[in-house]
Image (spheres, grey):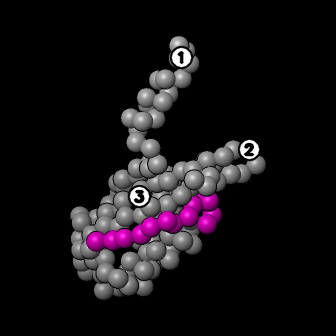
């Protein structure tokens, strides 16, 4: 397993982000998804974030990405949602009629951490530390 690093730390931080269109309106097609991905790549560079996997349904997107310990995830997500909402509505004006008011994204989001080992394996490893073997 290759770890990422910076001057003072070694890390491997994967996240799964799910963003949903307001009221789950079914407005995401391939061209809109492609543009959303481009915007994500553009903004993510400022936050030490790199996309690993991207997929969409008509009303939401799934993104697997890597971050750094100094990545400000909530600021990044808010910046992305704001910029992508503005640009998508400008570049694809036909979807405005399907949306409610000016909102593209739901206010909420789902962000999950991921890793190579299940949480229970890590929990047991930590619990076993300091135990004396006989």
- Mark 2 / mark 1, whichever is N-terminal: 2
At which x and y percent is residue 35?
A: 44, 80
Is 105 placed left or right of 13 in the picture?
left
- Mark 3 / mark 1, whichever is N-terminal: 3
- Mark 3 / mark 2, whichever is N-terminal: 2
Disc 3/disc 2 C-alpha distance (Å): 27 Å
Query: Dot 1: within a 10 Å radius of its alpha carbon, few (fewer than 14), some, or many (20 or more) residues?
Result: few
Identify the disc placed on residue 17: 3
Is 38 placed left or right of 20 in the picture?
right
Which residue sits at x=23%, y=71%?
Answer: 25
Which residue sits at x=61%, y=66%?
Answer: 45
Q: Is residue 112 above or below residue 80?
A: above
* Mark in front: 3 vs 1: 1
Disc 2/disc 1 C-alpha distance (Å): 33 Å
Residue at image mark 2:
8
Which residue sits at x=54%, y=58%?
Answer: 66
Please indicate, yes or no, whether residue 83 appears anywhere in the rendered image.
no
Residue at image mark 1:
133
At which x and y percent is residue 107?
A: 35, 57
Q: Magenta segment range?
A: 45-57
At which x and y percent is residue 85?
A: 41, 71
Q: Residue furthest front?
A: 134
Query: Dot 2: within a 10 Å radius of its alpha carbon, few (fewer than 14), some, or many (20 or more) residues?
Result: few
In this view, the residue in front, 75 or 125, is 125
Please indicate, yes or no, whether residue 85 appears anywhere in the rendered image.
yes
How many marks the image carries: the answer is 3
């Amino acid at each position: 397993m290759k770890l990422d690093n910076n001057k003072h730390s070694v890390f491997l931080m994967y996240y799964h982000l799910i963003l949903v269109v307001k009221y789950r309106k079914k407005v995401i097609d391939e061209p809109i998804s492609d543009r959303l991905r481009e915007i994500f790549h553009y903004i993510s560079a400022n936050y030490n974030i790199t996309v690993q996997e991207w997929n969409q349904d008509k009303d939401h997107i799934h993104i697997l990405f890597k971050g750094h310990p100094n990545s400000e995830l909530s600021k990044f997500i808010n910046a992305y949602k704001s910029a992508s909402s503005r640009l998508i509505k400008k570049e694809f004006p036909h979807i405005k009629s399907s949306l409610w008011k000016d909102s593209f994204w739901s206010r909420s989001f789902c962000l999950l951490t991921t890793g190579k080992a299940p949480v229970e394996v890590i929990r047991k490893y930590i619990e076993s530390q300091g135990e004396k073997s006989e």
